[in-house]
Image (cartoon, rainbow, N blue to C red):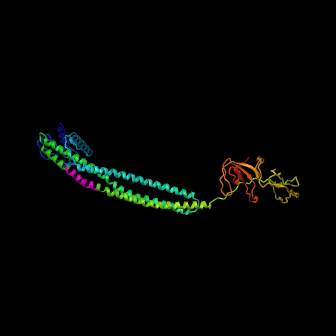
Amino acid sequence: MMQAVEIEEVEVENTPTPKRRSSHASRESPPSSPHSPCPPSPVSPCPPSPSSPTSPTSPTSDGGQEDSTASPASGHGGRRLPNIKIKKQYSKIFRIKTKILQNLGKADRTIDDVFDEYDANFTRQQTNANRLHKEVSNYLRCCRALHGASKGLYETLIEVYEPEWVGHELLYAQAQNSDMLWTDFCHKLQDQTLTPLTAYQQQFPELRKKIDKRGRKLVDYDSQRHQLENLQRASRRDEYKIARARDALETARTTYEVLNKELYEELPALYDQRIPNVASHLQTLYAAEATVMAEFSKVAKEVEAIADKLTKECAKGTYKVKRTAAPRPLSSVEASSPQNTTNSPSIRPTISAPVAQNKEETGRPYEEIEFEDKKVNGNVSQPARTNGEVLSTKIPQGATTEGLPPGVLYRVRATYKYTREDVDEISFEVGEIINVVEYEDPEEQEEGWLTGVKESTNEKGLFPANFTRPM
C-alpha cells in the first residue's frame, strides 16, 4: 500500500514531457500552447508551439524535479505548474515522509559516523566560543564600570583633600594616572581580545547553515534512492520513470557529495583552530591585565606615601587649629562703666562687696582702678576708688565654701568628659569632683580656665570651667 502511494506521488511530481511515445501514451495527452491551440487527437497530435518549446526536466536545488517549460499551463485543462513556494512545500513533505519511513525502518538511511563526530565537535566548539565571548563582553563591561567608580572616587578625594595639605598636587597627578591606565586597559580588551573573539565566533553560524543544508541534501538523496528502488520493484516497470529517477538520484548524490566534501575539509580545520585561538585570547587578556595591575600597584603606593606624609605632619601639629578659650567668668570686683545721664551731674562706679572667705585663706590686694574723666553736659565727678582685698578667682553663686580643705575655694562636679591636650591640663570623666584652688601665678591666669585638684587621683592642673558645675 505504501509503495503504491509513493509511485502515485512520483507520477504527479515528475510528469514527463511527451518527447517520445511510451506504453502509457494512451493515457497521456500532449501539451497545448496558448499561442497555438489545437484540440487533442489520438491520430495527429498537435506539435509544440515555437513560443513555448519543451525540454527535459531539470533537477531543483533541493533534489526535486523542475519543469523548464516556459508555458504557464500544461496537460488537460491548462493545469498550472507549481511555483517556487509550492515546490519548497513539496520538498519538505517528501523529506518528512522519508524521515518517517526511516524511523519506521521501511527506508534505508545513510549513516556517516565520522561526520557525526565532526558535527558533535563543532557543536561543542560553538558553545564554548559563545560562552567565552559572552563572559569577555561582561568582563569588559565590568571594567568600564570599575573605571567610572575609580574616577568618581579620585574626584571625591581631590575635593576632600584640602589644598594646603602636603601632597595635594601629587594626589591629583595619581588620579590622572589611574584614569589613563583604566582607559588604556579597556581599549586593549576591546581591540585585542573581544574583536578577534567576535571574528572567531562569526564563523560558526555560516558553517551551521552549511551543515543543516548537507543534512537536507542527505535526506533528498535517501528519498530519491528509495523512490528508485520502489520503481524497480514494481510489478509493471516503467523504464522512462526509472530513467528519470536515476537522473534525480544522480543529481541528489552530486549535490550531497559536494557539500559533504567541503565540510569534511572545513570542520576538522576549524576544530584544530580552537587551541591557538583560546591560547591567543588568554595570552592577550592576561598580559594586558598583568601590565595594568603592576601600574595600578605603583599608583596605590604613591597614594599611600602621600597619606603617610600627611599623618606625620598632623602628628607634628602642623595643621593644628589654635584653640580659643571660653569666656572667663567675671572677677570679684565688678566695675560698671560710667553712665551718662542728663539729670545726674556725676556718675560713680558700682563696686561689688568682697566675698567672705575662711581665715586660713590669704587674700591678695587688688590693684587700684583708675577711671578716665568723662563729662556729661560739662559736669562729671571723679569716680571713687575701692580699697580692700579681692580674690583673683571668683566664687560662683550657690557654691559651698564651708567645710573645705585648706586652700580650696569651692568644689565642682564634671558635667562633660574632657581629655587633656597639654601637659599642664587634667582629664576627667563625667561626675568626677574637682577642688578649685588659686592660680599659682595670677598673671598667667586664662579666661574660662580654672586650676583644680581631682579628688580621685589628687592630680592638679588646668581645666575648662564650662565643662563643670559648682557644688
Q: Position of residue 429 (x, y in %)?
A: 66, 49
User: Residue 232 falls in which quadrant of the image?
Assistant: top left
Along the line of sight, which residue is nearer the eye, 150 or 6? 150
* x and y, in percent, of residue 267 in the image: 27, 54
Residue toward you, 57 or 426: 426
Q: From this viewpoint, which residue is outermost toward the top?
A: 1
Residue drawn at 54 percent across, 63 percent down = 170
| Relative depth, front residue between 227 and 184 | 184
Say whether residue 370 is magenta: no
* Residue 172 x, y percent position in the rendering: 53, 61
22 relative position to 320: left or right:
left
Where residue 26 sits in the image (x, y, percent)?
12, 40
Q: Which residues are magenta?
A: 253-269
Dominant secondary structure (helix, strand or loop) of the stretch shown in magenta: helix
Report the label total.
0
| Residue found at x 42% / y 58% | 289
Q: Report whether 303 appears left or right of 230.
A: right
Q: Is residue 73 above or below residue 147?
A: above
Residue depicted at 42% across the width and 55% down the height = 140
Residue 71 appears in the rendering? no
Give the answer, above or below, for where 366 lies relative to 245: below
Q: Is residue 104 left or right of residue 25?
A: right
The magenta stretch spans residue 261: yes
Quarter occupied by the N terminus = top left
